[in-house]
Image (cartoon, helix red, strand yellow):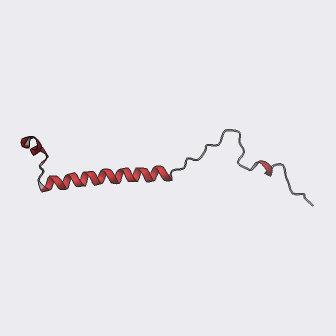
Amino acid sequence: MKRLFGIFVLTVPEQRLVIFVVLLLVAGAWLKHQRDLHYSPRPQPTPGMSPSPQGAAVCKPPTN
């Protein structure tokens, strides 16, 4: 059994590499979470909608 767990013994450079990779994965997941959190999709206007508000065309100011 001792020999089986010997595969998990890492040298110092290997430990640093594993820590670096784990930190990169955590940072990538956090950045993706933040981007998804702040992304707000804007609804696409349908063809035929006017860019002005609905009441703007009905109420015109009187001309003198």
Report whether 21 appears left or right of 35.
left
Task: Give residue 19's position: percent from left, percent from top.
Answer: 23, 54
Q: As drawn, is 39 to the left or to the right of 20?
A: right
Left or right: residue 16 versus residue 58 is: left
Q: Nearer the viewer, residue 41 or 4?
A: 4
Residue farthest to the right? Answer: 64
Closer to us: 2 or 39: 2
Q: Position of residue 15 (x, y in %)?
A: 17, 54
Q: Residue pushed farthest front? A: 1
Quadrant housing residue 6: top left
Residue in the image at 66% along x and 39% along y: 46
Q: In which quarter of the image is residue 50?
A: top right
- The residue drawn where x is 47% and y is 49% is 36
Residue placed most toward the observer, 26 or 2: 2
In the rendered image, the quadrant that contains the C terminus is bottom right
For residue 30, above or below residue 44: below
Q: Is residue 29 left or right of residue 55?
A: left
Q: Where is residue 59 in the image (x, y as percent from the top left)?
A: 85, 52
Q: In which quarter of the image is the N terminus?
A: top left
Name, please, the residue furthest toward the bottom.
64
Q: Position of residue 40 (x, y in %)?
A: 54, 50
* Residue at point 11%, 49% (across, down): 9
Q: Residue at x 90, y 58 (%)?
A: 63
Q: How many labels does the image show?
A: 0
Furthest-left residue in this view: 3
